[in-house]
Image (cartoon, grey):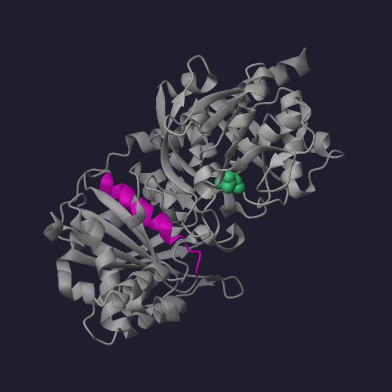
Amino acid sequence: MSASTKYIFVTGGVSSSLGKGIIAASLAKLLQSQGYKTTIQKLDPYINVDPGTLNPYEHGECYVTDDGAETDLDLGHYERFLNVPTSQANNVTTGRIYQSVIEKERKGEFLGKTVQVIPHITDEIKNRIQILGNSGDYDIVITEIGGTVGDIESLPYIESVRQLQWDLGEQNTLVIHLTLVPYLSAAGELKTKPTQHSVKTLMESGVQADILVCRTEHELSDGIKTKLARFCNVEKESVIQSIDASTIYDVPNLMLDEGLDKVVLKKLGLQSHECNLEGWNAFLTKHKNPTAEVTIGLIGKYVELQDSYKSILEAFIHAGASNEVKVKVEPIHSEYLTASNVVDKLKGLDGVLVAPGFGERGIEGKIKAVQYVRENNIPFLGICLGMQMAVIEYARNVLNLEGANSTEMEEGTPHPVIDLMESQKTIVDKGGTMRLGAWACNLLPDSIVSEVYGEAVIMERHRHRYEFNNSYIEAIEAAGMVATGVNPETNLVEIIELPNHDWFVGVQYHPEYKSTVANPHPLFVAFVGAVKKHHQQKKSASMA
Ligand code: GLN
């Protein structure tokens, strides 16, 4: 019931990149494991309507939900931790807030009033915060506010939190402030002053932090906790230490040890129960005790930035645990991969994943990588652009269609084996106009994928404008590549396989978005399984 939904706000202070998303997801995990239906929402203070048009160098990976929202990568963490799908309502930017207020103004909905930040923008923010709570689906909504307190662009959000605390009542809202307690090695001390200042900055906007979560490299002593409590107006039990962890998946247990869930529930007037983290801990045990290590090359053009392929890296962690192996991911920059160095760079790998992407940069390197793994029977998974590159490689080198390409890279290619989707041909705007979200796909019996999924029809998430050009299907299938997954309505090819190869699968969709701790993605699990087998075969061959 919406009246009883509790709202937790997570703000950040002192520095960016403290991991608000992981803290929010970990707290949500603890609350969920005690039976509370919990969801998490992210409010981003930038003016882009969504991160779909942002370069990964700016903002990391763009995460896509079932309902086709292009969102912040923190939503990926929420899904991976909670195993509950998120939606458009879980990510709101300043751009979207302003867009809807301006649209209402143009329709005359404000009846001649001057439209202002307060109340119009703040009302819109408050409505967006309450959409999930009002759905009746959740007991607790955690709202993560992007940016750092004190930023000009965060002000309307903090003001909305202040107002909501009044509107909803004290017991129904809670503010957690995530800060940094730096260690000064010259002084050999942890310093509380930056936290004191950031709590003060929050107070200048009329918001008092109820709980402090303090990121730190060293244990917070009792004295430091007392000091923080005294200067920041919180109880000592509300000063929670968040020490650096070796994996993000340790954070729920660390927060449990610190009693974050208990203080939160107490302050919200809710009962605290035993946490059921059985499945979670079983995953952690496997993750931390691998029986072997395999190396998978990740071929992409943003590999220098970890966040660009966040969901892929996390899906490998889940699939590694399922297979009881450690997946070492070797980033390989496609732009610098050439015919003369491809053998050197790929020969030691147990498997290769060719990453999604847009535009021409680095694609010839991706094609070279596909050729090498195809000819050397190395397990291969191509995702989106990676699948398209596999089709191009096959067309060029097996069907001898010289100059075969995607019209995304070369409009006048003599063999457009990958072409713009019909539905995309009239589209001009770039934002939110790709083929997005979950679409059905029929699987061909007796294929790798039908065995992997164990289902005849699957739903997977998409984000692309180009597709396999069906006028080449007969020629390509006659040469040995098989379309093993097809959209039932449009006939779009969603999956290709090479039956005469040990494990070669390309998918037009993004399986990585749906991999969670509780539900590692079957395709990643099967790929890592094939990689493990390849690794073992190589090892026994070298010992023979
Ligand atoms: N650029 C390709 C397309 O739009 C692939 C997109 C992707 O890899 N997500 O079809």
* Residue 534 visible in the displayed image: yes
- Quarter occupied by residue 114: bottom left
Instruction: Give the residue at x 51% y 36%.
Output: 288
Q: Is residue 23 magenta?
A: yes
Residue 197 as seen in the image, left or right of residue 485: left
If the image is split into quadrants, where does the C terminus sit?
top right
Q: Residue at image x 50%, y 27%?
A: 485
Q: Label the magenta part by its dominant secondary structure.
A: helix
Q: Position of residue 276 (x, y in %)?
A: 28, 39
Q: In screen coordinates, is 88 left or right of 494?
A: left
Residue 185: image location, x then y, percent: 60, 70
Q: Identify the image quadrant of residue 339.
A: top right
What is the magenta range?
16-32
Q: Tell me if I can see residue 233 in this picture.
A: no
In the image: residue 124, left or right of residue 481: left
Q: Residue at x 77, y 18 (%)?
A: 542
Taking depth in this image into account, of 213 and 48 the one nearest to the observer is: 48
Q: Is residue 80 left or right of residue 16?
A: left
